[in-house]
Amino acid sequence: MEKRVLVVEDERTIADAVAARLRAEGFLVEVAGDGPGAVAAARRTPPDAIVLDVMLPGFDGLEVCRRIQAERAVPILMLTARDDETDLLVGLAVGADDYMVKPFSMRELAARVHALLRRAAKGAAGPVGPPTLRFGDLEINQAERRVLRAGVEARLTPTEFDLLVHLAAHPRTVLPRERLLADVWGWADASGTRTVDSHIKGLRRKLGSDLIRTVHGVGYALEVER
């Protein structure tokens, strides 16, 4: 069954190029040029993934992301013209799964969309391993995709949850960024290590700075008792 991708971009040349590439990859593509149009399109024909520009008329991509994710979880790849970490962290916080900075390669964009959909399908297949993982005051319910620390639920994005589960499967083991990109994001290259760093910052903000240890120049480890 063909997957639907909603492309939200107000620059017509970019929107047409992205849509053409994704159609060539076998996707059904719909295009919206502003914030209200994007939300309406997602409600009218629910997409399997969204490619979403941050700067949009009507209201911006962050608000589009908030509204769509509040109604239905969908993988979102955000496009931004600025390589600003604050913007990227805000985008991830409101429910984006990944981001790319303009200008970008159409081949890489298509690869990222394929990876998002593979991860979504993997998540829908159900948990691997025990339904609930417990480490001290950290509880990860894989079946319900919920995380609690000291009894308080943390609202994680789908990618943050998958990243945490992967770290929890190898407690106190330092996992290189490149391995995390391959195992969690499904990327074959190491071009997006900042993506890993941004998601780790999101996990620390929501779960506490003491939970994940950085090994500079290598990667990250979940600091819990085995």
Image (tube, helix red, strand yellow):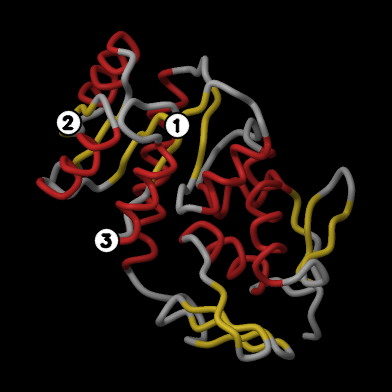
The residue lying at 75 percent from left, 57 percent from top is 175
Q: Quarter-wise, where is residue 40 in the image?
A: top left
Sequence-first disc among 3 and 2: 2
Sequence-first disc among 1 and 3: 1
Mark 2 surroundings: few (<14), some (14-19) or many (≥20) residues within 10 A:
some
Residue 161 falls left or right of residue 195: left
Rendered location of residue 217, percent (x, y): 87, 43
Circle 2 residue? 30
Q: Is residue 26 above or below residue 41?
A: above
Amino acid, disc 2: Glu
Amino acid, disc 1: Val
Mark 1 surroundings: few (<14), some (14-19) or many (≥20) residues within 10 A:
many
- The circle drawn on residue 71 is 3
Looking at the image, do the residues carrying marks 1 and 3 touch, with CB atoms under 8 Å apart?
no
Q: Is residue 215 above or below residue 152?
A: above
Amino acid, disc 3: Glu
Rendered location of residue 201, percent (x, y): 71, 54
